[in-house]
Image: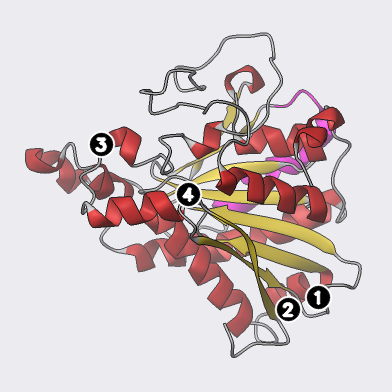
Amino acid sequence: MSGFPQLCHTEVIGTSSLGRELVAFHLASRALHEPTARLLVTAQIHAGEYVAGYVARALVRTLLEEYERDPTVSTLLRRATVTVVPLLNPDGAHFVWQRRGWVGFKGARATANGVDPNRNFPFVSIPGRRAWNSSSSRPWSPYYRGPHPLSEPECLALARLCKRARFCAAVHLHSFGGVTFFPASANPQVAHVLDVFRDVFPAAQRHHRYRPVPEPVSALCGQLDLFLLHAFGTPSATVEVSRPRFALALRPQRWLHFFSWANPPDPERWVENDVPATIRVLGALLERTRGHPLLPEHPEMAEQVPE
């Protein structure tokens, strides 16, 4: 990204358990120290979801290359700083790559410590039915939430970034499934913001429209979406990039190869499908939040994030 010094600033926000850097790209048409709304895009928090990181990096390229060419991109970068963290789990990603994807379901999600990083964020206990994949205190579970919230340095680094930046909204890229998950909040202001994933986002997708799936907040134990909303007032959604190929059903030898399910052979098709839609939805989120985070429901959770 060195060809765009006026638009892109890179920052190492932390390191992984094994010492790999966690890099954030801050994209804006103005200097970072100037007051501006802030939007966040994260990707590949789960080790094997390579296509999510691929789409995130393509988003960075598109925002840089289309500035002053595409009015939507130009307006977005003039009004906001878009921060993209395209690889949140570098240790897990390296392990998956070394093993050519043969890591099992837990290995395709976990950090180097065997923790599901998207269950490692602080949470408050909410009455209601838990989902089968909410989180687990059992270390052998693929949804193991770790010994304590923010035990994973990757999650701690992201939480510190969010505490500092106070993003007005966020999008988290995962794979696969072709759906968009977001908290089913009873707060009408939150619901109004997140409704962009019911209309704006799918309407802008070129090949495949993702189905919006509101999730009961009682089911979201330790997940990034609800942590950002509760601690910082940052509404966000989880976008499951791509759809599994029907051809996989005809290849029994690949049924247990999670990498094949999570990563399509044609990632550029999903770049075409999801990058323009993500740019559109970032603009819509900026409009509906007016560039400011909402009132957090549990601001005390932010105190669990050390400086």
Q: Amino acid at mark 2?
A: Ser
Q: Are marks 2 and 1 in contact (CB under 8 Å)?
A: yes
The disc label shown at residue 116, or none = none
Circle nearer the N terminus (1, 3): 1
Q: Amino acid at mark 1?
A: Arg
Report the residue marked by disc 3. Answer: 104
Report the residue marked by disc 4. Answer: 209
Residue 188 belongs to the span the image colors magenta: yes
The residue located at (82%, 73%) in the rendering is: 32
The disc label shown at residue 78, or none = 1
Q: Is residue 232 left or right of residue 140?
A: right
Circle nearer the N terminus (4, 1): 1
| Quarter that holds the N terminus | bottom right
Q: Are marks 1 and 3 in contact (CB under 8 Å)?
A: no
- Estimate how packed mark 1 is, as few (under 14), some (14 to 19) or many (20 or more) residues with alpha carbons within 10 Å: some
Residue 5 at x, y = what percent?
68, 87
Q: Which mark's residue is nearer the viewer, 1 or 3?
A: 3
The residue segment tinted magenta is 185-203
The residue located at (51%, 39%) in the rendering is: 117
Circle nearer the N terminus (3, 4): 3
